[in-house]
Image (cartoon, helix red, strand yellow):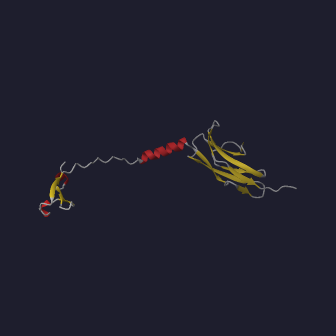
Amino acid sequence: MTPASYGWGQIYKVIDGENGVVFTDKPSVMDNSSNQSVEEVELKETNTAAPLQVRPPSTANSNSSRESQAVENPTVKILSPPNESTVAMGPGNFSVSASANPALSAGERLILLIDGVAQGEPQSSGTWFIEGALRGPHDLVVQRTTTRGRMIAASDPVKIYVLRPSIR
């Protein structure tokens, strides 16, 4: 391509008697004395590349990939009681609440373990009421299981402290 095809005119390099260099598109403006040299400048073709075609991620694909990740990685979280909490002085009664993400599918159940011992049968609800817990520290874990009892996921353990009066 020539400079004219880019919309440019011809470019000239003018060197004056003191070796000063000027680039111009009008060499006639310069003094035509013998102390100057004028050369036409041949411009090389500019390096260009077509822009890359970038497609934005499809929202349908991102939603389905999120859903498939959720199905691949089910989780369980104990919402209450908070970790390192204390069950106040009394009979040792407290409630446990847990959530499953994604929601339990048909045949999945939750089971509460206190110090590794299951509290009742697996259930579809994420709430339990515990009565008469023994005094001292206890670790709570909720497991997500299949109907056959295979564990799919387990919550992080939550430690609680039960305060109960003791006879001395």
Please determine whether, in this image, residue 48 is positioned above or below residue 107. Answer: below
Nearer to me, 24 or 93: 24
The residue at 38%/48% (across/down) is: 56
Nearer to me, 18 or 138: 18
Please determine whether, in this image, residue 37 is positioned above or below residue 1. Answer: below
Residue 17 seen from this side? yes
The residue at 51%/43% (across/down) is: 69
Quadrant where the C terminus sits is bottom right
- Residue 59, image x, y percentages: 42, 48
Relative placement, left or right, of 82 versus 19 is right
Q: Residue furthest right?
A: 168
- Residue 15, image x, y percentages: 18, 59
The residue at 69%/54% (across/down) is: 84
Nearer to me, 126 or 46: 46
Relative placement, left or right, of 73 versus 27 is right
Residue 131 seen from this side? no
Q: Quadrant of residue 89?
A: bottom right
- Residue 95, image x, y percentages: 69, 53
- Residue 134, image x, y percentages: 78, 50
Q: Residue furthest top?
A: 148
Total labels drawn:
0
Please determine whether, in this image, residue 150 is positioned above or below residue 82. Answer: above
The residue at 53%/44% (across/down) is: 70
Nearer to me, 53 or 101: 53
